[in-house]
Amino acid sequence: MYRTMAKHTCSFFRTSRRAVLAASLAAFPVLAEEAAPMSAAEAAPAIAPDIRQELLHELPAADIRWLEAESGRFPVLLRREVLGDSRGGVILLHGYQRNLNWPEVIKPLRELLSEGGWYTVSVPLPPNPPAQDLAPPEPDPMRPPMAKDEMAGAASGTEAADAAAGPDAGAGEAKSEQADYRGIVAQRVTAAVKLLNGEGQFNVVLLGYEAGANWALDHFKVQVRDSLAGLVMIDARNRVRGLANQEWFLGLLVDEKRPVLDMSGPAEDLQADAARRAGVARRAKLPAYRSMRRMKPDSSVRADDPDLARVRAWMEKNVRRELVSGK
């Protein structure tokens, strides 16, 4: 009998508590609505307009990481080192009309560098370069050195580049995307640097292939060593769509002490452009600049491409240094 009474008493109190809670929510409907959490889709920024769904299906799903920038969320391909002795991190920029896992240079380097102790992050360039050339960015001599976790967007003396920091970067309008191209590249590279820093990698190299090499240099020359320790350019041309004049590389070749590898060829036009850059570097007596001619591999098999092994060897010798845990 007592058990039955106790059971009914507990049931009564549970029912009363539910009734009181329901009455409270009914009395304050606005507060109840505000307390509801947003869904993940509502809370996440929009995907950048240049990221195609078809591309995502082509990429290795296990390597995809989503990063955020003012222009929207974008995917990168992260591959951790498998050697067990980390050398640092490498950010890869592909050329126009290429992709994050391009079978020439980009994908093979992701694998080879990972096996050599380097973390790699392949970053997407927007497919359509600016319709009008952007003036070369000029470093600000009054700018203090930036901390590793700070936003290190590329500086520019033009209104087009200044607009890159605005909230409408990559919003979908063609004109806005054209003007903000440099800003989009800077934001994505910076987000990739932060990703590597979060993995404990502060010895970061920026590597660009074809047009990606030009944009890599465009960003690299306005950064401090604590942000980017070295640069590798592969098959760069002295003029690409979107970057002004054939002297785009001269801004780098002024008192630049960070190691730079400039690998080009074997096409005659690539060699001619590389020879001009090497001549400027030689006259400027740049100790850390190295020009290297590419050799045509015997096959498309990664192990048979001597150029990629030489890139890794150069990085091992010139860019590897004691890692730091951050400041």
Image (cartoon, rainbow, N blue to C red):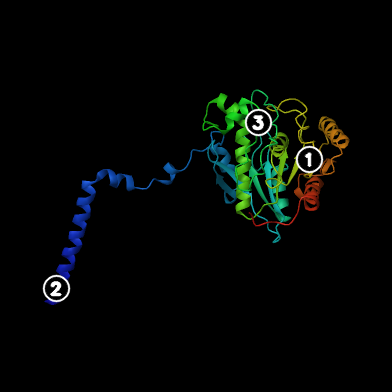
Mark 3 lies on residue: 156
Residue sticking out furthest to the front: 142
- Secondary element under disc 2, as helix, strand or loop, is helix
Q: Position of residue 213 (x, y in %)?
A: 73, 37
> Is the residue marked by circle 2 packed among few (<14), some (14-19), or many (20+) residues within 10 Å?
few
> Separation of disc 1 and disc 3 at Cα?
19 Å
> Separation of disc 3 and disc 2 at Cα?
80 Å
> Is the residue marked by circle 3 packed among few (<14), some (14-19), or many (20+) residues within 10 Å?
many
- Secondary element under disc 1, as helix, strand or loop, is loop
The tag on residue 177 is none
Q: In this orientation, which residue lies closer to the viewer: 269 or 323?
A: 323
The residue drawn where x is 51% and y is 38% is 47
Mark 1 lies on residue: 256
> Separation of disc 2 and disc 1 at Cα?
87 Å
Mark 3 or mark 2, earlier in chain: 2
On screen, residue 130 versus residue 113, left or right, reads left
Q: Nearer the viewer, mark 3 or mark 2?
A: 3
The tag on residue 4 is 2
- Secondary element under disc 3, as helix, strand or loop, is loop
On screen, residue 194 versus residue 256, left or right, reads left
- Numbered marks: total: 3
Quadrant where the C terminus is found in the figure: bottom right
Q: Position of residue 78 (x, y in %)?
A: 62, 49
Question: Taking the image as drawn, is residue 59 in sight?
Answer: no
Residue type for callout 1? Glu
Decide: marks 1, 3 in contact (CB < 8 A)?
A: no
Q: In this orientation, which residue lies closer to the viewer: 136 or 261?
A: 136
Above or below, comparing residue 82 to residue 162 in the picture:
below
Quadrant for residue 184, please give it.
top right
> Is the residue marked by circle 1 packed among few (<14), some (14-19), or many (20+) residues within 10 Å?
some
